[in-house]
Image: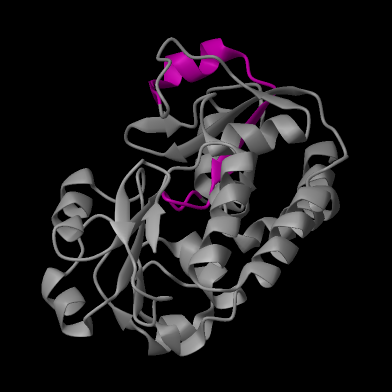
Amino acid sequence: MLTEDQIGHSFSLPEAPKRIISLVPSQTELLFDLGLGDRVVGITKFCVHPKKWHQSKVRVGGTKNVDFEKIANLSPDLIIGNKEENTQSEILELQEKYPVYTSDIKTIPEALNFINAMGELFNKQAKAIEIAQNIKKELQDLQQVKGKVLYLIWKNPYMCAGSNTFIAQLLNRVGLTIAKTADTGRYPVLTENEIRDLNADYIFLSSEPFPFGIKHIEALQAVSNAKVVLVDGELFSWYGSRLLMFKAYWENTLMLELAD
């Protein structure tokens, strides 16, 4: 079976893969929810969901520094990565030895297409369709909050999600728009003065990749008049089955914090 991934790379699979390595946390969780069980033989140290896989599966390094020897010892017949979360050089090296499916997800439709593609690869079409349709339903008619938001993902230096990211897509779904920065890249770098001058209505401090906490709220409140809140980074940036939890988090938790 000839397969093409989301970056246009084609590879051949003689049969449905039975020894899968996932290099992306959100994709690992999706494989679990598709019911792949023992067919997944390796994950990264950042693949914390499901907990029992994090405790029991072989860890093949991080998302940007994979352990090639551990991967070789697992004899994978498919490796699943992501254009943004994994490094290009490592993906290219892995492609020379193994079938590698690399996702490239910046929009909700691309996320749904990826879920369905995984269903096709693993003969789990019915479950994949169910997950994708439920996500599509969950993300329709979300309660709205209007305003301009700065979504910070890193400190020293401050970095934020740009308007051409998956995070921005979810924020748009709930009525929020990304604060425009001079840097139009996907993850602009900001100074405290630039944060102040953005005049955002809200500043969201993501729980990942940088672990923002209470002390960071206080620091930013000294810089900006925006309402500053901590947010669950997994629910804004994981584009697999965790999206099924987004509506409940938004409407039952985060909206209440914004209104407080």
Above or below, comparing residue 188 to residue 131 in the picture: above
Residue drawn at x 43%, y 80% is: 54
Image coords of residue 185 (percent x, y): 40, 21
Closer to us: 67 or 227: 67
Which residue occupies 82% across, 31% down? 145
- Residue at 16% over, 47% down: 89
Q: Position of residue 211 (x, y in %)?
A: 45, 53
- Residue 223 location in percent, x, y? 53, 23
Q: Nearer the viewer, residue 130 or 171?
A: 130
Image quarter in which the C terminus is found? top right
Vertical order, 226 against 94 (above or below) = above
Q: Which residues are magenta?
A: 188-212
Depth order, front residue of 117/224? 117
Q: Quadrant of residue 74?
A: bottom left
Asked whether residue 231 appears in the rendered view, the answer is no
Is residue 52 highlighted in magenta?
A: no
Q: Quadrant of the N terminus?
A: bottom left
Residue 46 in sight in this render: yes
User: On the image, which quarter does residue 188 sit in?
Assistant: top left
Q: Is residue 157 left or right of residue 88?
A: right
Q: Residue at x 53, y 10 (%)?
A: 197
The answer to whether residue 97 is above or below residue 124 is: above
Q: Position of residue 254 (x, y in %)?
A: 76, 47
